[in-house]
Image (cartoon, helix red, strand yellow):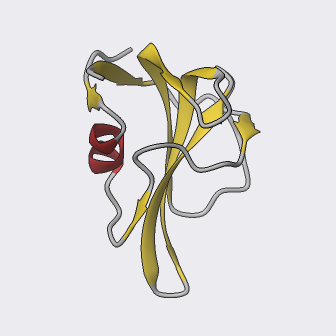
């Protein structure tokens, strides 16, 4: 898959640690349960000394739809672009 992930302004609140950003995906990402996610939260955080960058399906408001980690999620670094690339998206666009 080759798509574009556009970072959206942080217009949502949440109880997050680390670097958390909301992205709109074009085309939407197919999730593990067969639904499509057109927005995702990408969270890059250190947990107990381990770096992890995870992608979660979200609403346009930034509310997580499902806490199942999506394709591209990985441990070992804090890297939004790397996680999205692993899912088949390049960061682009802008708002």
Of 24 and 28, nearer the camera is: 28
Q: Is residue 50 left or right of residue 31?
A: left
Counting from the top left corner in percent of width and height, residue 27 is at 42, 12
Give the answer, above or below, for where 44 lies relative to 66: below
In the picture as drawn, the residue positioned furthest to the bottom comes out as: 49
Q: Is residue 1 left or right of residue 43?
A: left
Give the answer, above or below, for where 52 lies relative to 29: below
Of 27 and 16, nearer the camera is: 27
Counting from the top left corner in percent of width and height, residue 62 is at 66, 32
Name the residue located 66 percent from the left edge and 22 percent from the top edge: 35
Give the answer, above or below, for where 79 lies relative to 39: below
Name the residue located 27 percent from the left edge and 49 percent from the top edge: 82
Q: Quadrant of the C terminus?
A: top left
Name the residue located 31 percent from the left edge and 55 percent from the top edge: 79
Q: Is residue 53 left or right of residue 1?
A: right
Name the quadrant containing residue 60: top right
Of 30 and 54, nearer the camera is: 30
Give the answer, above or below, for where 38 lies relative to 85: above
Name the quadrant containing residue 59: top right
Q: Quadrant of the N terminus?
A: top left
Name the residue located 49 percent from the left edge and 66 percent from the top edge: 45
Total count of labels: 0
């Amino acid at each position: 898959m080759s798509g574009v992930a556009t970072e959206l302004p942080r217009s949502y609140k949440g109880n997050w640690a680390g670097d958390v950003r909301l992205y709109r995906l074009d085309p939407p990402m197919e999730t593990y349960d067969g639904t499509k996610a057109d927005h995702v939260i990408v969270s890059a955080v250190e947990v107990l000394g381990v770096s992890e960058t995870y992608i979660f399906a979200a609403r346009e408001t930034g509310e997580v739809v499902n806490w199942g980690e999506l394709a591209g999620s990985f441990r070992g670094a804090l890297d939004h672009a790397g996680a999205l690339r692993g899912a088949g998206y390049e960061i682009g666009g802008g708002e």
